[in-house]
Image (cartoon, helix red, strand yellow):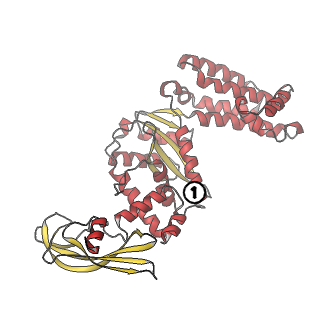
Amino acid sequence: MTQQELFAAALGLVAPWKVARIEFSAAEKRLDIHLDFEPGSLFRCPNCQALSNAYDTSEDCWRHLNFFQHAAFLHARVPRCDCKSCNTIRKVEVPWARPGSGFTLLFEAFVMALGQEMPVSAVAKLIGEHDTRVWRVLRHYVRQAVKSRRLDDVTTIGVDETASRRGHRYVTLFFDLDKKRLVFATTGKDATTVNRFVNHLNAQGGTPQQVRRVACDMSGAFIKGIQGQLPNAEITFDRFHLTKIVNDAVDQVRREEVATNVILKKTRFLWLTNPTNLTRSQKRQLFSLSARNLKTVRAYNIRLAFQEFFDKPNLAAGEWFLKQWYWWATHSRLAPIIRAAKTIKNHWDGVLNWFSSRITTGLLEGFNSLIQAAKARARGYRSDENLIAMAYLIAGRLNFGLPT
């Protein structure tokens, strides 16, 4: 096997392509492989796939996977075919790279694998390319994979927003809770985000009527969008957001009371953590404080009682319990607790839907933390489009169709 035949086999070249010559420079740490085709070869038209002769050629270059520690580049005279079927002249698509890319498919597959595990700036430094080129590769394959995926089986979704940048900039995420994957991401967090999700669902073979269950927080914008765009969807207000509302009320009571009772200073963690997650010394401190006549203790007991709602066996038991809890909370003479209870009352049906759907946005919160961690490692992203691309890479479970 000659040197040219060896590299042709390693590159997976098929006729009419062949390795014409190889140039290696140890000083420049560079390997250049020049490809060519046999005279008189026929090529398929990119439009109609009819076989045609080469009309003329242009020299192109692509970055390939490193040859050991040396940067490798492919060079080729890429022909334009004179297609008689289309009656047009079109540039031939080469099998080792996508049209318009300066990288081979294998190199882009390498970039995509790195991009899912490390910050893009680190990827760019590792491969010796500017990060804007890396982002172009990532965004291209994410767009193609999202566009090619069918969504006709999506029936249960979770909706949540994640901060994209400072200044109240957000990206809204729509998850398929059954398959645990991100199916759509868009900028903003208003009612129009649901409209954009529905448009995407229609474009990918789905319909808004197929969505039966939605888990979200009590955002008025999300509620309005879901009720207007997903006619068959039953809204379940997420248990984590409901618990957070009550927790925030408890903390507000503590912050108001600490002004007159310094013993409550630096005890926030005690009141917002479940007793089973406290250390032995923290439990002793909580027991000592609970023996005092404190407003915070009353709010804390109401908080613990609310958590029992989600353990009730059925809708009847859950609704009876919630009515009792609501009466207790609204008669507590604790303004923050009363406001929290009335907020829950105003969303009564969505709270009780827990017993029929049993869905939460816990999965979203987990992926949200991964997305925010990736953003922190990257020290932020230049655009919302980059954040959305990274969200798909982390949580989309996309098939990029790249060689391995």
Relative height, residue 47 to residue 335 (above, below): below
For the C terminus, which image quadrant? bottom left
Q: Nearer the viewer, residue 280 or 319?
A: 280
Residue 299 located left or right of residue 4? right
What residue lies at 57% left-to-right and 28% top-to-bottom?
348
In this orientation, does residue 260 appear? no
User: Which residue sits furthest left?
Assistant: 84
Q: Secondary structure at mark 1?
A: helix
The residue positioned 53% from the left and 20% from the top of the image is 315
Judge left or right: residue 256 versus residue 227: right
Pointer 1: what residue?
375
> Do we see residue 256 in this rendering?
yes
- The number of callouts visible is 1
- Please state the horizontal and vertical placement of residue 107, each as a whole percent of the image: 39, 65
Q: Position of residue 308 (x, y in %)?
A: 64, 23
Q: Quadrant of the N terminus?
A: bottom left
Residue 223 lies, in percent from the top left, at 51, 39
Taking 60 as reference, is 103 above or below it? above
The image quadrant that residue 336 belongs to is top right
